[in-house]
Image (spheres, rainbow, N blue to C red):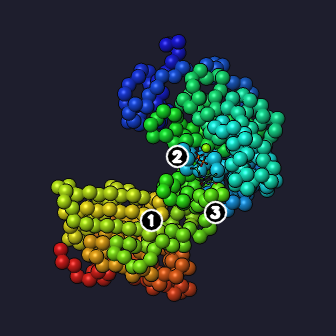
Amino acid sequence: MAKNSQYICNACGAVHSKWSGRCDACGAWNTITEEAAATGPKRTSIGSAKGRSIPLTDLSAEDAPLIRTGSGLEELDRVLGGGLVPASAILVGGDPGIGKSTLLLQAAAAFARKGAKALYVTGEEAAAQVRMRGQRLGLTDAPLQLAAETNLRNILTTLENERPAIAVIDSIQTMWSDHVESAPGSVSQVRACAHELTSFAKRKGVSVVLVGHVTKEGQIAGPRVVEHMVDTVLYFEGERGHHFRILRAVKNRFGPADEIGVFEMTGTGLQEVTNPSALFLSERDQPAPGSVVFAGIEGTRPLLMEIQALVAPSPLASPRRTVVGWDSARLSMILAVLEARAGLSFGAQDVYLNIAGGLRIGEPAADLAVAAALVSSRQDHPIAPDTVVFGEISLSGALRPITQADARIREAAKLGFSAAFGPQGMKTLGDTPLKLHTYIDLNDFIHSTFGAIET
Ligand code: TYD
Ligand code: MG
């Protein structure tokens, strides 16, 4: 037995020859567990005539009829790149309790209503519980097939017999294959089951959606170990205290990555949010120092978000820097540039930065909006509430042009904003009433917006 076991990191899936407290591959602590090595037929290196190749040009359109199926849930279809591609494998990851089962039950029902044969396999709940949830979500009229099963062999048999167009496996961590000795949820099991299901999807033309829990403790193999096997990786995220949920494509072989879909969790399930900018800004009231609206782009869609900063004198020797929804290293950089290029010191102040609504921004284009929020709070000088701000700040303090400026400006104009602050090189759009203010560098921006500042 000992001979046949291997040591696998639950976080990244790296295989080690012996146990250690820290995984050399990903640096995670306490994630390595002993697992039995997979037993299966031995692979030979040279196969039969099946292993042939064909020229790409010989593939006719009928060989690969990639007609996407829409679910009718627009937010979901967009994230998928315009609908579900037949025979594709999709992974939906997210924290436990965030709403993955709810989303996929609603999605499966939506596909079923559109005429696609859909099967929802649950390994976590009893069929009766899923039915109850379906009732609450108002899905009882949808022609959806349901199975409560965790044995992979039984699931594959069901798929073979039923031949659905789409099958949801909730969750991959509860499935087990009898070819693998280790417990369900271990890296070997998760990998083996995901591999079987994705290759079944390709062979038989069934679209398979795998649900995977993200775990911080590393007790259960996270979705990362199967990311490379699937065509599309979606993450369902959101803050606990907020109702908003964001479905984000991080990998998509059939569409743009970085695309997001916005949902709201309500008492009767997830509702689509078709105009997220209006929603994320709806909590704004009076002009307040430290509050700035950033005109961002999420995927292919412009999205206006509120950036909030609070700068307050600190009693601590090393003042606090707390960031929610943005990169903390990026905040340190902006603070350093403000100090070095504009002479504004934050050394004796606590700095808190928050993106309202539980959103997370990854774009460098938010730099100028963050700097504006910081200076606005530090000087107790509000920025006009009908203004949007965007631009990337370089270490020299110069403002760099950003992509898709016109889409950002159009969105702001649509929502009634009357001015935009940004880097030089943007063209005024003839068809929007919005007034553009452009600046060469950070100093220029600060002087024009806040006047002369005593440092
Ligand atoms: P669930 O889909 O079970 O999460 P996951 O599969 O990601 O673990 O969602 C659970 C949460 O969603 C739970 O805290 C309750 C909430 N919820 C609602 O607010 N409204 C609803 O209609 C449903 C079904 C769930
Ligand atoms: Mg669930």
Other-residue count near label 3 (Cα within 10 Å), few / some / many at <14 / 14–19 / ≥20: some
Of callouts 3 and 2, the N-terminal one:
2
**Front in this rendered view, residue 259 or 213:** 213
Q: Residue at x 29, y 62 (%)?
A: 351
Q: Residue at x 44, y 77 (%)?
A: 285
Counting from the top left corner in percent of width and height, residue 129 is at 69, 42
User: What's the distance in space between the residues labelled 3 and 2, CA to CA?
Assistant: 20 Å
Other-residue count near label 1 (Cα within 10 Å), few / some / many at <14 / 14–19 / ≥20: some
Q: CB at mark 2 closer than 8 A to ligand 1?
A: yes
| 43 over 80 or under it: above or below | above
| Residue where numbered disc 3 is placed | 272
Amino acid type, mark 3: Glu
Q: CB at mark 3 closer than 8 A to ligand 1?
A: no
Counting from the top left corner in percent of width and height, residue 111 is at 75, 53
* Mark 1–mark 2 CB contact (< 8 Å): no
**Front in this rendered view, residue 251 or 151:** 151
Q: Decide if residue 82 is in sight here.
A: no
| 125 over 364 or under it: above or below | above
Q: Residue at x 64, y 61 (%)?
A: 271
Amino acid type, mark 1: Ala
Q: Is residue 320 left or right of residue 246?
A: left
| Residue where numbered disc 1 is placed | 356
User: What's the distance in space between the residues labelled 1 and 2, CA to CA?
Assistant: 20 Å
| Residue where numbered disc 2 is placed | 95
Q: Which mark is residue 233?
A: none
- Dot 3 lies on which element? strand
**Front in this rendered view, residue 62 or 40:** 40
- Res. 259 image quadrant: bottom right
- Dot 1 lies on which element? helix
Amino acid type, mark 2: Asp
| 6 over 76 or under it: above or below | above
Of callouts 1 and 2, the N-terminal one:
2
